[in-house]
Image (spheres, helix red, strand yellow):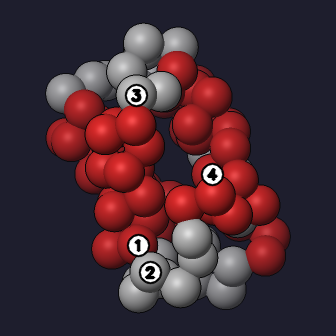
């Protein structure tokens, strides 16, 4: 992903998961649903919605189940050539 898009994704995670910048960009790949208490089904929907809006893309419903980690989401977005 382009650097500016990575920063946008980082901002989305900071906002939705209320990270307050506590996780540096280079450590976000370790963030996943299992190790963050605020990452639940509601925040997952909010992440999807915010990502679709920010990047002007439409994510297939079948892909929603893959939204379990930052790195998985980043990989999915790389498929959109962002």
> Which is more N-terminal, label 2 or label 1?
1
Return the residue nearer the eye: 15 or 68. Answer: 15
Quadrant of the snapshot with the C terminus: top left
- Residue 39 lies left or right of residue 21; in this view the side is right
Q: Which residue is mark 2?
A: 21
Nearer the camera: disc 1 or disc 2 = 2
The disc placed on residue 72 is none
Mark 4 vs mark 2, CA separation in Å: 15 Å
Q: Earlier in the sequence, mark 1 or mark 4?
A: 1
* Image coordinates for residue 67, horizontal then vertical, percent: 61, 45
Task: Determine the residue positioned at 57% across, 26% down.
Answer: 76
Q: Are marks 1 and 2 in contact (CB under 8 Å)?
A: yes
Q: Earlier in the sequence, mark 3 or mark 2?
A: 3
Q: Specify whether 39 is left or right of 57.
A: right
Q: Residues within 10 Å of mark 2 (few under 14, many from 20)?
A: few
**Which residue carries the number 1 mark?**
14
Question: Which comes before the other along the chain, label 4 or label 2?
Answer: 2
The residue beneath circle 4 is 70
CA gap, disc 1 to disc 2? 6 Å
Q: How busy is the neighbourhood of tag 3: few (under 14 within 10 Å), some, or many (20 plus)? A: few
Marks 1,3: beta carbons within 8 A: no
Between the residue at mark 1 and the residue at mark 3, the CA separation in whole angstroms equals 18 Å
Between disc 1 and disc 3, whose residue precedes? Answer: 3
Discs 1/3, front: 3
Residue wearing tag 3? 2
Left or right of 11? Residue 39 is right
- First reached walking from the N terminus: tag 3 or tag 4: 3
């Amino acid at each position: 992903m382009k650097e500016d898009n990575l920063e946008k994704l980082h901002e989305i995670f900071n906002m939705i998961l209320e990270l307050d910048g506590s996780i540096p960009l280079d450590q976000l790949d370790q963030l996943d649903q299992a190790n963050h208490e605020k990452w639940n089904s509601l925040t997952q929907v909010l992440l999807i919605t915010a990502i679709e809006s920010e990047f002007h893309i439409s994510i297939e419903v079948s892909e929603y189940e893959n939204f379990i980690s930052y790195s998985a989401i980043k990989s999915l977005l790389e498929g959109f050539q962002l």
